[in-house]
Amino acid sequence: MMCGEELRMVNSSSMEVAKIATQMAISSREEEERLKDEYKKSGILATAVNIGGNINESTSKILERALVAAKRSSVIRDEHLHEGGVIGATRDALMQIRERASGQNVGGKVGIARKGQHMSVCIFLSVGLLHLDEVVIGIGHRAVPE
């Protein structure tokens, strides 16, 4: 059983990684590169990738882009549990935005961050509704082996 201090450390890592994934998803391309370098110095691996298209037709492409970005930037290792973690967290984030974005064209970014065993994926999207754009955000978390 965990004591209070250990529990706070675990929760703070989960929260920290979720915040960083969100920051990566809302960053500009210029900010993204600076943030990646900054976080790496703190032992946090992070990346982001642009996504877009009809949400219903793009789900598998979004999953693929998140996985490829995480591998290319070494946020995860090329192993089954890490890949499954990215796919699972990305699917969770997609489920949170699906109802508001269903059938619509979207554009935005997927942010991914990992520190130790904690990994979060955040999806930040603009949903096109004629001239009225809606903004949606979803986030997923997984524990992966270090």
Image: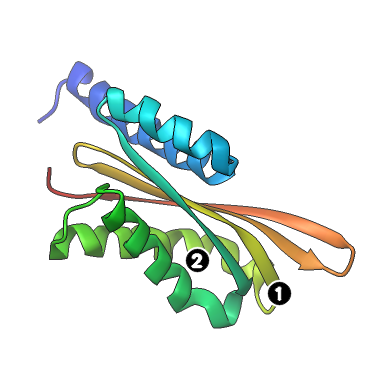
In the picture as drawn, the residue positioned furthest to the top comes out as 5
Q: Secondary structure at mark 1?
A: loop
Q: Position of residue 1 (x, y in %)?
A: 9, 31
Amino acid type at mark 1: Gln
Amino acid type at mark 2: Met
Q: Secondary structure at mark 2?
A: helix
The quadrant of the picture occupied by the C terminus is top left
* Residue drawn at 30 percent across, 30 percent down: 40
Q: Are marks 1 and 2 in contact (CB under 8 Å)?
A: no
Q: Position of residue 84 (x, y in %)?
A: 24, 64
Q: Using the image, determine if residue 121 lies above or below residue 46.
A: below
Q: Residues within 10 Å of mark 2 (few under 14, many from 20)?
A: some
Circle 2 residue: 95
Q: Looking at the image, which is closer to me, 29 or 124?
A: 29
Residue 141 visible in the snapshot = yes
In the picture as drawn, the residue positioned furthest to the bottom comes out as 57
Q: Relative to residue 107, is residue 69 drawn left or right?
A: left
* Residue drawn at 58 percent across, 80 percent down: 56
Front label number (1 vs 2):
1
Q: Relative to residue 1, is residue 56 drawn left or right?
A: right
Q: Position of residue 5 (x, y in %)?
A: 21, 16
Decide which of tag 1 and tag 2 comes sooner along the chain.
Answer: 2
Circle 1 residue: 104
Q: Relative to residue 6, is residue 60 drawn left or right?
A: right
Residue 19 visible in the snapshot = no
Q: Position of residue 54 (x, y in %)?
A: 64, 77
Q: Residues within 10 Å of mark 1 (few under 14, many from 20)?
A: some
Quarter of the rendering containing residue 16: top left
Q: Using the image, determine if residue 127 lies above or below residue 18.
A: below
